[in-house]
Amino acid sequence: MSFTYSKNGRARPRRATSSSRGGVSRKSSGSGKRSGDRTEVPDSLMTPSWGNVFEDVGFPPDEARSLQLRTDLMIEIERVMKRRKLTQAKAAKVFGVTQPRISDLIRGKIELFSVDMLMTMLFRAGIEVGLTLQPRAA
């Protein structure tokens, strides 16, 4: 059993949820069911997607496309890191940035990265990035 020490120095046992398996909390959701249980949602309660999650949650279409593009590039950088089994420090050298920048990327801090920077990082890692241009559907 592990303990957490409070400011006044007394040890208290940790809650079971803080060390639950796989990082999944076993606390009840209040409905009597475990939070991991899935229930079917009727189609009438589902909202169809536009194909871009950022547009679905209310971003203007142009900004949503930019956010989606940056997200796709960030995901590809993470895939490169996993395939090459890079630590953050090694990845920083490969991508030509600092380790804290890699940490920001992994934490999903999308607002800190431009499309240009993300493409440059991929180029430095030897990944060819393509761009397709087409007229917008009316």
Image (cartoon, rainbow, N blue to C red):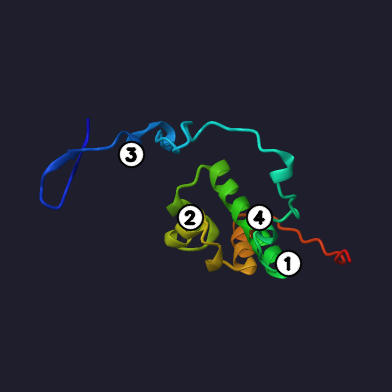
Placement of 1 over or under 18, stated as above or below: above
Label whose residue precedes the other's in the sequence (3 or 4): 3
x then y, percent, for residue 29: 45, 38
Label whose residue precedes the other's in the sequence (4 or 2): 4
Disc 2 secondary structure class: loop
The structure residue drawn at horizontal position 17% and vertical position 39%, both measured from the top left corner, is 12
Label whose residue precedes the other's in the sequence (4 or 1): 1
Q: Which residue reaches farthest left? A: 9
x then y, percent, for residue 47: 72, 50
Disc 3 secondary structure class: helix
The amino acid beneath tag 4 is Asp
Label whose residue precedes the other's in the sequence (1 or 3): 3
Characterize the local packing of mark 3: few (<14), some (14-19) or many (20 or more) Cα atoms within 10 angstroms: few
**In the image, is 16 to the left or to the right of 132?**
left
Disc 1 secondary structure class: helix
Residue underneath mark 3: 18
Characterize the local packing of mark 4: few (<14), some (14-19) or many (20 or more) Cα atoms within 10 angstroms: few
The amino acid beneath tag 3 is Ser
Marker disc for residue 61:
1
Residue underneath mark 4: 72
The structure residue drawn at horizontal position 45% and vertical position 48%, both measured from the top left corner, is 87
Placement of 97 over or under 107, stated as above or below: below
**In the image, is 34 to the left or to the right of 19?**
right
Residue underneath mark 2: 107
Residues marked 3 and 4 touching at CB (< 8 Å): no
Disc 4 secondary structure class: helix
Q: Give the Cα distance between marks 4 and 2.
A: 14 Å
Q: Give the Cα distance between marks 2 and 3.
A: 21 Å
Front residue of this view, candidates 96 and 74: 74
Label whose residue precedes the other's in the sequence (1 or 2): 1
x then y, percent, for residue 131: 77, 61
The structure residue drawn at horizontal position 57% and vertical position 42%, both measured from the top left corner, is 83
